Image (cartoon, rainbow, N blue to C red):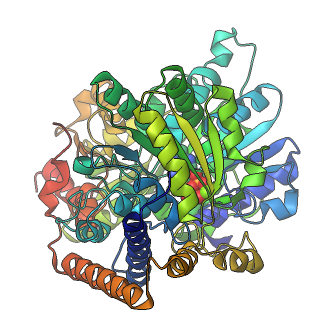
Amino acid sequence: MATMTFADALNDAHRIEMRRDPNVFVVGEDVGIYGGIFGVTKGLLEEFGEMRVRDTPITESAFVGCAVGAAAAGLRPVAELMFVDFVGVCLDQLYNQGAKMRYMFGGKAQIPMVLRASCGAGIGAAAQHSQCLEAWFMHVPGLKVVMPSTPADAKGLLISAIRDNNPVVFLEHKILYATEGEVPEGEYTVPLGKADVKRKGEDVTVVATAAMVPKALAAADALAAEGISVEVLDPRTLLPLDEEAILASVKKTHRLVVVHEAVKFAGPGGEIAAMVAEKAFDYLDAPILRVAAPFSPVPFSPPLEQAFIPSEERISQAVREVVGA
Amino acid sequence: MSITREKLVDAYTTMVKIRTFEEHAAQLFAEGKIPGFVHLYVGEEAVAAGVCATLRDSDYITSTHRGHGHLISKGGDVKRMMAELFGKRTGYCKGKGGSMHIADMNLGIMGANGIVGGGPPLAVGAGFACKYLGRDDVAVCFFGDGAANQGTTHEGMNLASCWKLPVVFVNENNCYGISCSVDRATCVTDIADKAAAFDMPAVTVDGNDLMAVYEAASEAVERARRGAGPTLIECKTYRQRGHFEGDPAEYRSPEEVAEWKAKDPIPRLEKKLLEMGVLTEARIQEIRAGVLAEVEEAVRFAEESPLPDPSEVTEDVYA
Ligand SMILES: Cc1ncc(C[n+]2csc(CCOP(=O)(O)OP(=O)(O)O)c2C)c(N)n1
Ligand SMILES: [Mg+2]
């Protein structure tokens, strides 16, 4: 184990896979000379050279489409979208082309690519550089959607995503890049589609994603002092969703709060809540609550942005509400 | 069309105002008083000032992430701009937008833009509205050398040309899109050459020469106003600072930066105007002092203004 940041853990995953498999290459804006705007691809150009670490012009459709086409032709691209908000520029190449080729061609193609993107609010980057759009991708059959919350998960999931034979959208909350944690060395993998219980508890299940996981854990600590035992579960992969793990937790605690930074309406929490209501209704002792962002674009001004992002206090309130405290 | 002496003084004043505004913004950002991203236009002032000197209030512009210069040149109020940079309620966007989204619809400023290549189709739309409504106003689209490679830019230029719309595409070729130098991003030497694909007239000018920019822009704007269609103007210039404040900009050499600083458009225009007798040293000092007072007042206004209330988050989502 080594202590490293979330960004360095992702960097490590790139290096391991690029050393292991000569068909893995990196493509995107400022991934080479600059080392990625958040530093994730730092040093890769020096180690692997220009053929495998491709700086592109500002042309998201061209380079994301290039990743799709190269994957169809046998390579394993890792494309970096600087901010997930830019996906609108190139969405067709991802969801109409990459996600559907295999199905449309009757199973005769595979698209082993990863589209990495930063997401999330918290640095005053305003409405076009701060969104959490995971629900958009969750709505597309053919994609996988990953959203890690710790450096170790980031590394293990990225390695799995690169090895997966499907297009994987890999979402990195920008607030997490500088966070540190213990990360296993070498070819450490975390399987896609497997949730992780980040804290065991008895009274209520809090399903949280990305930057909401540390907040949920902090809330759980505080609530423990009030005598409320919170289980915090991080799905880690949103598509496919580890329904089994979520259901097992809810069947134990009988209460569910879902926390995410994406806007609440038609967000990922709606899907999780509906799944639990369908499959474990009889186990529930209280209505399922969602803690999520209000239905607005992400505002710039710090007090507005802080009001937008779900707070530890709002998570605690929801937990108190479902346990009737 | 040559520029009047009065317009020259105005354009010079505008350039000094942009520079002064941004020097203050840089300092305030470093002090932590301005949150988020700030992209400065230092070294490129002649482009916005020269182009906007040919426009009137009812004309439209679309801007970029590097928008302060465009906004000030189109008549934007530095008090409300600075307040927006601070995220204050008195700012242009009530603190909702920040530096990257300042807009003034009353002055035809359709917003700075966080999406590279977001502006060109919008300018096409504004140009279409002018034509549709029988107005002789025009839309100017400022976009970078990086943005010149986006599909939206090419689609926008094609549509403007097909429909003979009153749009002027102003390319700010400042040699880089973040770390990507223009020669690594496109195979043509002059971005103006791209217009050939749309049968659109195009010209390349020295973007650090206010008069050259003005001349090219006035011809293009006049052409657009009389319904003869769009033009592409490429202005060769240079971004003197990092891509955003805090960018160490290690992707370029200090020699290159020094070479371009020597071609700074402001002292260059100043020298010319002194030679022409349009300005005197005394008048220059007077202009600079006036601008400084205005910007300092803007900073004071921003600092003293209230922050928005958290309850305002969900306001303004729908009309
Ligand atoms: C669609 C999109 N892709 C990438 C970015 C990130 N980005 C912001 S500014 C920039 C460089 C833009 O270069 P250019 O158009 O030359 O403008 P300049 O910054 O030089 O003024 C990039 C890549 C973005 N904001 N939007
Ligand atoms: Mg540029």
* Pick the front one: A175 or A183: A175
Residue A91 seen from this side: no
What quarter of the picture does the C terminus of chain B occupy?
Answer: top left
User: Does residue A22 appear left or right of residue B128 in this picture?
Assistant: right
Q: Residue at x 40, y 57 (%)?
A: B53
Residue B215 seen from this side: yes
Q: Quadrant of residue A182?
A: bottom right
- Residue farthest to the front? B277
User: Does residue A145 appear left or right of residue A271 in this picture?
Assistant: right
Vertical arrangement, residue B121 with respect to residue B267, above or below: above
Q: Position of residue B45 (x, y in %)?
A: 50, 66
Vertical arrangement, residue B142 with respect to residue B245, above or below: above
* Pick the front one: B1 or A215: B1
Q: Position of residue B274 (x, y in %)?
A: 51, 82
* Pick the front one: A196 or A253: A196
Q: Position of residue A49 (x, y in %)?
A: 87, 56
Q: Quadrant of residue B316?
A: top left
